[in-house]
Amino acid sequence: MKNDSLSDLYQIRFSNEELPRKNAIWKILCQSYFSRFINESDTIVDVACGYGEFINNIKANRRIAIDLNKDAEKFLSQDIEFNLCEATKLGSVIKNEADVVFTSNFLEHLPDKKTLDELLDQVMITLKPGGKFLILGPNLRYLPGKYWDYYDHHLGLTHLSISEALQLRGFKIDLCIDRFLPYTTKGSLPTHPLLVSLYLKVPLAWKLMGKQFFIVASKP
């Protein structure tokens, strides 16, 4: 998708009124859950950073954001390094230096499995030995119809298929949760900090409401 088209799609899909609500949710997600996989001394790369909900709220020594939407930079903290480029060019931005690469709700937007393989190879190039790749995404197994309601969803993935793809490219699977977060932030997940924190502490709730997988893979 071209840069201008992507910018237009983001504006249609995410209203300005919704952004504070999403940011409030992601602040708790980062503080209460994702931070356990990241040290404050780390270098972290957010691939397809969107409006910076993750990268703005996670603590790390060096934070790098990648996106094809030129508007993304306007939403990022000043200390975040923004790169306007394709995810499959990730290795040209940083090589063998990242402790963590993170991506959320992005892989399903890739056009085909060949492109996914190219991206995974670039993530491998980007990470240090022992570095981690954190992946959050909708699980087709639990969203057989709704998965395709978004115009730019092309690649159907489950927790098992992406795990297999990762292993084929040389990654080791450290953690695979098939049901983690609800599908969207529009009414599915409570936004009050205490309620979001409570949800994260009750894995039984994930089994009832979770429609997205969360996977941690590492570079040997």
Image: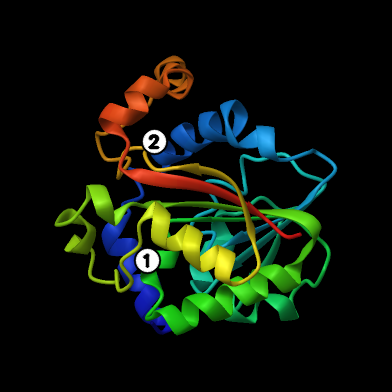
In the picture, measured across the screen, residue 96 lies left or right of residue 150, that is right
In this rendering, the answer to whether 37 lies above or below 77 is: above
Task: Report the residue marked by disc 1.
Answer: 108
In the picture, measured across the screen, residue 98 lies left or right of residue 167, that is right
- Mark 2: few, some, or many residues within 10 Å (few <14, many ≥20)? some
In the picture, measured across the screen, residue 138 lies left or right of residue 148, that is right
**Image position, residue 112 (x, y; %):** 38, 81
Q: Residue at x 61, y 29 (%)?
A: 31
- Mark 1: few, some, or many residues within 10 Å (few <14, many ≥20)? many
Q: Earlier in the sequence, mark 1 or mark 2?
A: 2
Given residues 47 and 132, the one toward you in this image is 132
Q: Which residue is drawn at 37% across and 26% down?
A: 191
In this rendering, the answer to whether 5 lies above or below 157 is: below
Which residue is the extreme one toward the left?
145
Whether residue 39 can be seen here: yes
Q: Quadrant of residue 65?
A: bottom right
Task: Report the residue marked by disc 2.
Answer: 21
**Image position, residue 93 (x, y; %):** 74, 75
Task: State the quadrant of the C terminus.
Answer: bottom right
Task: State the quadrant of the N terminus.
Answer: bottom left
**Image position, residue 41 (x, y; %):** 85, 42
In the picture, measured across the screen, residue 137 lies left or right of residue 146, that is right
3D distance between C-alphas at marks 1 and 2? 24 Å
Given residues 49 and 218, the one toward you in this image is 218
Given residues 140 and 167, the one toward you in this image is 167
- Which amino acid type is marked by label 1? Glu
